[in-house]
């Protein structure tokens, strides 16, 4: 029984690798760039998982698109801009800073300060 558990635990990381062998590029540098880009892009189906580690069909399709664009000679910025055009800011794990994203970060603190002010103002 312990041997079975040991084998399962040892082989588990191999099942977690989402990039399939037919997707891997022959050129090591291009493959590394593809992996780096894939880690920056969010899977549209499985939230909070990058396309490099996702097993969803759309993630596989996006990995293939990234690899095809790399073999065509596109730069990382061109690929990321293409993905941004197609899917918007949500595709990025680190979306660009815009006015509404600043509001999302500032409003909770601002509301907390207002609440504290109102709470202590009534007590005094």
Image (cartoon, rainbow, N blue to C red):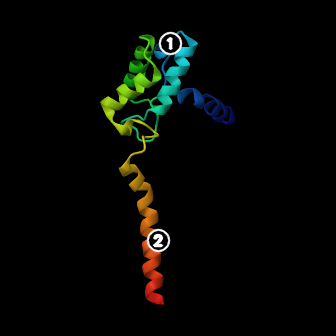
x, y percent for residue 82: 35, 25
- Residue at image location 68% in from the left, 36% down from the top: 2
Residue at label 1? 25
Q: Position of residue 17 (x, y in %)?
A: 53, 27
Image height of 73 relative to 60, above or below: above
Residue at 47%, 89% (x, y): give it: 123
Q: Which mark is residue 113?
A: 2
Q: Is residue 57 left or right of residue 3?
A: left
Give the percent coordinates (x, y) of residue 23: 46, 16
The Cα atoms of the two marked residues, 1 and 2, are separated by: 53 Å
Which residue is most to the left?
Answer: 86
Q: Secondary structure at mark 1?
A: loop
Residue at coordinates 52% horizontally, 21% vertically from top-left? 33
Visible residue check, residue 57: no
Task: Indicate which disc, 1 or 2, sits on the residue closer to the N terminus.
Answer: 1
Q: Quadrant of residue 75?
A: top left
- Sort mark 2 into few (<14), some (14-19) or many (20+) by Cα contacts within 10 Å: few
Residue sitting at the far bottom: 124
What count of labels does the image hold?
2
Q: Position of residue 99 (x, y in %)?
A: 37, 50
Residue 80 in view in this figure: yes
State if disc 2 and disc 1 touch (CB < 8 Å). no
- The residue shown at (61%, 32%) is 8
Image vertical order of residue 76 relative to residue 87, above or below:
above
């Amino acid at each position: 029984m312990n041997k079975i558990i040991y084998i399962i635990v040892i082989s588990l990381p191999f099942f977690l690798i989402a990039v399939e062998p037919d997707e891997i590029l022959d050129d090591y540098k291009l493959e590394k760039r593809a992996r780096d880009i894939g880690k920056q892009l969010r899977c549209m189906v499985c939230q909070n998982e990058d396309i490099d580690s996702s097993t969803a069909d759309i993630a596989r399709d996006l990995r293939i698109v990234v690899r095809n664009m790399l073999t065509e000679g596109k730069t990382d910025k061109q690929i990321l801009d293409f993905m941004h055009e197609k899917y918007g800011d949500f595709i990025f794990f680190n979306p660009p800073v815009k006015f509404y994203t600043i509001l999302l970060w500032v409003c909770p603190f601002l509301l907390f300060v207002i609440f504290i002010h109102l709470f202590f103002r009534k007590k005094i």
